[in-house]
Amino acid sequence: MSEPLRIVVITSDLVVEDPEDTHALDQAERSRSLRIGLLESGFNLIASLPADVFLTERLAQLQPDMIIVDAESDARDALEHVVMATRDERRPIVMFTNDHDTRTAREAVAAGVSAYIVAGLQAERIRPILDVAMARFEQDQALRRELADTRNELNELSTALKDRKVIDRAKTLLMQRQQLSEEAAYAKLRKTAMDKNLKIVEVAQRMLDVADLLG
């Protein structure tokens, strides 16, 4: 049986100082409902943290599997802190909010949020939402790895082509100046590289540099 997801919730200070502040009371109740829903759904809620300058260090210590941002009017600020805190070690991010601003939603998705949920705190919705968010994150990570591998392959191919051109120029130089065949010129480059414990392309480049210097 797999271990339950270890979740950190990012939220603002939920201490309601004014009992007449209905907005603050509603926000506190939303956050409480979210936590209850997570626990009832079998998730491991390991911490509730503010979105502050210490967030990166705290997440590094806790190593959660997923981050949930519970934000409303301060959604953009909270999201900015979370994105910066997970820049070097990406994790799935789910955002629960009452902010209906479509621009905020677009910014969240562009920043890497796996799921942006408006007014979706019903307990029965939490598990499928987080399951989909995790699947989307894993797919995104797989695509990123594939893209990185493709870039590496292209870089290696580009480097190999450049090296080939340098070696070919050095061979041509030897063939012209020492009246060697192509095979003999390459053999000479290879032997020099072995004797000096260098790569053939390094020997070829040094030879071309000297030739350019002497004219």
Image (spheres, rainbow, N blue to C red):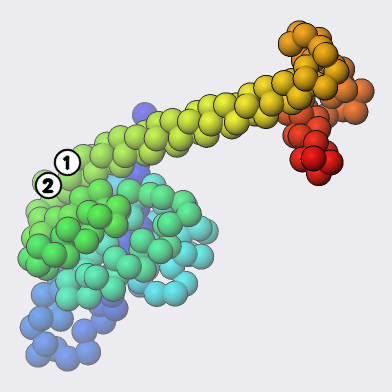
Q: Nearer the viewer, residue 126 or 1?
A: 126
Tally the numbered discs: 2
| Residue 76, picture quadrant | bottom left
Taking the spot 77% from the left edge, 20% from the top edge, the residue there is 176
72 over 171 or under it: above or below: below
What is the quadrant of the C terminus in the image? top right
Amino acid at the residue labelled 1: Pro
Amino acid at the residue labelled 2: Arg
Q: Nearer the viewer, residue 208 or 203?
A: 208
Q: Judge from the rendering whether residue 110 lies leftward or rightward of residue 52; answer left or right.
A: left
Reading the image, the residue beneath label 1 is 128
**Could you tell me residue 198's position as x and y percent?**
83, 29
**Could you tell me residue 101's position as x and y percent?**
9, 67
Given the current orientation, which residue lies at the most extreme right position?
Answer: 195
Q: Are marks 2 and 1 in contact (CB under 8 Å)?
A: yes
Reading the image, the residue beneath label 2 is 125
| Residue 70, picture quadrant | bottom left
**Could you tell me residue 17's position as x and y percent?**
22, 89
Q: Secondary structure at mark 2?
A: helix
